[in-house]
Image: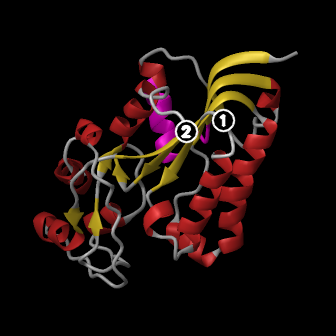
Amino acid sequence: MIKKKFLGILGPRGFVGSSIVRYCKKNKIQFVGITRKNNIKYKNFEFKFLINCAMPSKRYWAKKFPAKDYEETVKKTNFFLKHYTFKKIVQISSVSARVQLDTIYGKNKKKAENLVKKFNNFTIFRLASMYGKGLGKGVLIDLSRSSTVFLNKNSRYSFTQVDKIAEFIITRINQFKNKTVEIGCNDYLQLEDIKKKIGSKSKFRGEIDNQVLKYNKMNNFFGSSEDVFIFLKRTMHK
């Protein structure tokens, strides 16, 4: 017997997935969180919307373990597409699928997107760097701890609050049909400028990595990347 559900969230414990879960709970939106432990159980369910937040977001891990990243990004996406029933698939991807196609991480994100595009009702949301509750790794954490940043100081990032991302995804889940949409702040910050402003002692070592979104008027919804300094101030005073 097929059981119908409104919303399935793949990867509900990850950074983006947990933010979507928080938004759904706060607004009393029915959902099912699908994890490694219970994913087989929900193969007999029919979802109106299936949101895939389950892909890894560790770019340097992907470089070190390319086969594992392919398994967790491309093969896992293919598994969900083949074995789950849904009216619409929402793929949470990365701007790296556009700006880092010379990397394992970017290539695999793009391959997963191409699998999703074979379905007749999808939306792909590409995200850049985010901050907020649950952030435990990445360039912002390194800067706040004065750790080495393995990037060039001139790298530019569009930093966006993750809860704003979650709100946008759920409230606009039906707005974009068969489209790839980059969402987040329209502006960006240079890493060297962040270091100076927060008084970090981090040293930079690496290549330029620009995680900047394409300009879109709707992205004014997310505010400014400079809001990240509020987050950093709280993080550094914990």
User: Few, some or many C-alpha atoms within 10 Å of disc 1 (few <14, some 14-19, many ≥20)?
Assistant: few
How far across and down, in percent of the image, does residue 208 sit?
33, 79
Task: Identify the residue at image location x=21%, y=54%.
Answer: 187
How is the rendered protein coloured? secondary structure
Looking at the rendered structure, the secondary structure element under dot 2 is: loop
The residues colored magenta run 10-23
Quadrant (top left/top right/bottom left/bottom right) for the N terminus:
top right
Circles 1, 2 touching at the beta carbon (< 8 Å): yes
The secondary structure that dominates the magenta segment is helix
Looking at marks 1 and 2 on the same chain, the residue that comes earlier in the sequence is marked by: 1
In the rendered image, the vertical position of residue 157 relative to residue 89, given as above or below: below
Q: Which residue is mark 2?
A: 178
Q: Based on the displayed image, in which of its 4 quarters is residue 166 positioned?
A: top left
Q: Is residue 157 magenta?
A: no
Task: Identify the residue at image location x=58%, y=60%.
Answer: 110
Query: Of the residues shown, which amino acid type is indicated by label 2?
Result: Asn
Looking at the rendered structure, the secondary structure element under dot 1 is: loop
Q: How far separated are the C-alphas under marks 1 and 2?
A: 7 Å
In the rendered image, the vertical position of residue 200 relative to residue 185, given as above or below: below
Does residue 133 appear left or right of residue 37 in this picture? left
Task: Identify the residue at image location x=38%, y=55%.
Answer: 128
How far across and down, in percent of the image, does residue 218 sit?
28, 37
How far across and down, in percent of the image, does residue 18 sit?
50, 37
Task: Identify the residue at image location x=27%, y=67%.
Answer: 156
User: Few, some or many C-alpha atoms within 10 Å of disc 2 (few <14, some 14-19, many ≥20)?
Assistant: some
How far across and down, in percent of the image, does residue 98 sit?
46, 63
Q: Which residue is mark 1?
A: 120
Does residue 226 appear left or right of residue 26 in this picture? left
